[in-house]
Image: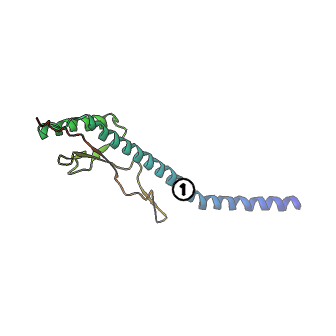
Amino acid sequence: MNRRARAAARARQRGGISIEFVLLFPLFLVVFYAILSYGVSFAQLHALNGLAAEAAQATRAVVIEGDESDIRSALDKRVDAAVDRYGGVLSVRGCANGSNRYAYSASEGELTVCLEADLLLPSLTIFGLRVPDIEGPLRSRSRVRLAVLEEDET
């Protein structure tokens, strides 16, 4: 009889374990997806920040003198070369002044690189919670002051 009581208790416990699993597994899945999606989003933002900084630093070698169209052409080449080095890793586009990748102020000699990229993982709404709760697209800006050659007064 003792054996039968233990067997009956185990049989009742199996049903309880199944119910607990069914109730807790979606919660575990939400927490796992939140960790994964936030991690991927922060890694993507980190790479985007590095790309914007690298593109801004690449323009420092441009000598600011002469015609403005020549200056903009040289800046375009430098910024595009820095962004293209990443290849297909990040699909970025510009977010400065009408989707340009940079904005240049000739009067101040300042260049601002602005890049944006869509989130790699989609946001899911589960149990009324949005995971990850990040407004897209991700944006990064980097600013650098370019050296302007002053003309010699003789």
Quarter of the rendering containing residue 74: top left
Q: Residue at x 54, y 56 (%)?
A: 31
Q: Quadrant of the C terminus?
A: top left
Q: Secondary structure at mark 1?
A: helix
Front-most of 30 and 10?
Answer: 30
Residue ID for mark 1: 31
Residue lying at the far bottom in this picture: please name it.
Answer: 128
Residue at 50 percent of width and 53 percent of height: 33
| 140 to 83, vertically: above or below | below
Decide if residue 6 is on the left or right side of residue 23: right
**The N terminus - image quarter:** bottom right
Residue, far right: 1
Residue 148: quarter of image: top left
Residue drawn at (24%, 50%), measured in percent from left and top?
96
Please state the horizontal and vertical placement of residue 13, each as a whole percent of the image.
Answer: 73, 60
How is colour applied across the structure in the image? rainbow
The residue type indicated by label 1 comes to Val
Question: Dot 1: within a 10 Å radius of its alpha carbon, few (fewer than 14), some, or many (20 or more) residues?
Answer: few
- Residue at the extreme front: 154
Q: Disc count in the image?
A: 1
Q: Position of residue 29 (x, y in %)?
A: 54, 55
The image position of residue 110, as x and y in percent, is 24, 46
Horizontal arrangement in the rendering, residue 63 relative to residue 140 (left or right): left
Expressed as whole percent of the image width and height from the top left, the position of residue 90 reads 35, 41
Quick one: 137 or 141, which is closer to the camera? 141
User: In the image shown, does 27 or 41 lie closer to the viewer?
Assistant: 41
Quarter occupied by residue 12: bottom right
